[in-house]
Amino acid sequence: MDKFTKIWLILVSLTIFAFLIGWFRVSSYLIIGILLISTFIKGELVIEYFMGLGEIKGKFRYIPTVWLATIISIIAAGYYL
Amino acid sequence: MKNIRKNYPPGDFGVWVIIYIELLTFGLFFAGYIYSRRADVELFNASQLLLDTKSGFVNTLILITSSYFVVKAVQAIKTMQLQEAIEKAQKWLLSAIGLGGMFLIIKMSEFISKYQDGINLSTNKFFMFYFLLTAFHFMHVMLGMIILFNLYNKTKIGGYTKDDHRGLESGASYWHMVDLLWIVLFPLIYIIR
């Protein structure tokens, strides 16, 4: 199995996890925290491997990562604060 | 030459400027959604229950898989011999376009279902954001499919090779951005309550 197939399987697994949280209407602080972390991981996998930015040096690599971290932080702040 | 490429993202730099601008635009929409949700959490949570989580889930799987197919197309061009690369890349791209079409059909049926239930942009703030965000994303999927179709046509005539595939990488990067946006949209709109 190649690297990209493994990444795709991780993405599918994390998506199933997110769906189950929605399906069972779970809304505890802990579960939502885990969901947000898993969303960050999914986004990072797309940025690093699918977009190919993992092989790039410097600021261009980190702009989407900073964007994703900022958005997830804003969502977390809106949910928890 | 190799060192220069390692300092810049795959594809044309212009497409990355577009990607960064799109991320910023959607980011502002996401922040607006969160800000509005805080003002009326109960309304947002109650309205969210009216959405079809299964559609959102299936569409997430579709976009992730479509993105994976585009990666496979780029890999085929970069690593295989020309004729085999063209054949494989064509199949992967066509499959990715097909999945994009499925995404649009499911999303459109979701929109129609909501309108039939009497729900629209002016129903409440949650649905205003729901329709604006998902319709805006819908348009990006359509544009992405047009780009993928052009990549498919150029691949078919041998327009991309091991040494020259920058255009393919540019289009692929745009499609991955569409996927990335939906990866955030799905939990934000359908799950988190």
Image (cartoon, rainbow, N blue to C red):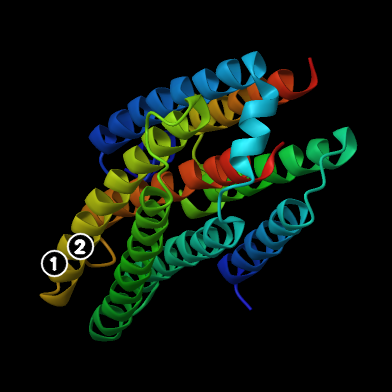
Q: Is mark 2 on a helix, strand or loop?
A: helix
Q: Quick check: B179 left or right of B47?
A: left
Q: Is mark 1 on a helix, strand or loop?
A: helix
Q: Foreground: B160 or B26?
A: B26
Which chain letter matches label 2? B
Distance from the alpha carbon under mark 2 to that under mark 1: 5 Å
Numbered label attached to residue B154: 1
Q: Quick check: A43 left or right of B23?
A: right
Q: Where is residue B142 in the image (x, y as percent from the top left)?
A: 25, 53
Whether B48 is drawn above or below B159: the answer is above
Which chain letter matches label 1? B
- Does the rendering let one see residue B140? yes
Q: Foreground: B109 or B1?
A: B109
Residue at image coords 36%, 49%: B115
Give the amino acid type for the residue marked by disc 1 in the picture: Lys
Q: Position of residue B81 (x, y in %)?
A: 30, 81
Residue at image coords 63%, 13%: B39
Say if mark 2 contacts mark 1, CB within 8 Å: yes
Q: Mark 2 sits on what residue?
A: B151
Q: Quick check: B142 left or right of A16?
A: left
